[in-house]
Image (cartoon, grey):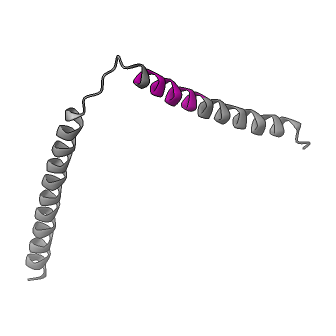
Amino acid sequence: MIALFLRENVESESQKAAEQAEQEDAADTSARQDAEEVDIDLNDPEVAEAAAKIQAGFKGYKARQEVAVMKVSSQEVMTPL
């Protein structure tokens, strides 16, 4: 009797998971369609300027990460044992 209850419980949980996966797939498809509808003129000078600013910001972010790693490693070398 307990086994039957557990089996039914597992089956209902798997059905819920399947329904949730279907809903997520539908939402993903809808989001993908919305993303495809965006029309950006890649030849627009303002778009190129915006892209350059984003790239420069990311490059600075990566450089700051590298400097932080170098500071930590130089402190480890200088630390007396």
Tell me the chief SS of the magenta region. Answer: helix
> Which residue is more in the foreground, 73 or 7?
73
Quadrant into which the C terminus falls: top right
Report the residue at 71% width, 33% height from top: 67
Residue 49 inside the magenta-drawn segment: yes
Answer with left or right where residue 38 lies relative to residue 26. Answer: right
Percent position (x, y) of residue 77? 84, 35
Residue 52 inside the magenta-drawn segment: yes
> Which residue is more in the foreground, 11 or 59?
59
Report the residue at 52% width, 28% height from top: 53
Answer with left or right where residue 60 lies relative to residue 48. Answer: right
Q: Residue 19's quadrant in the figure?
A: bottom left
Percent position (x, y) of residue 65? 65, 36
Task: Identify the residue at the far bottom of this view.
Answer: 1
In the rendered structure, which segment of residues is drawn in magenta? 47-59
Report the residue at 70% width, 36% height from top: 69
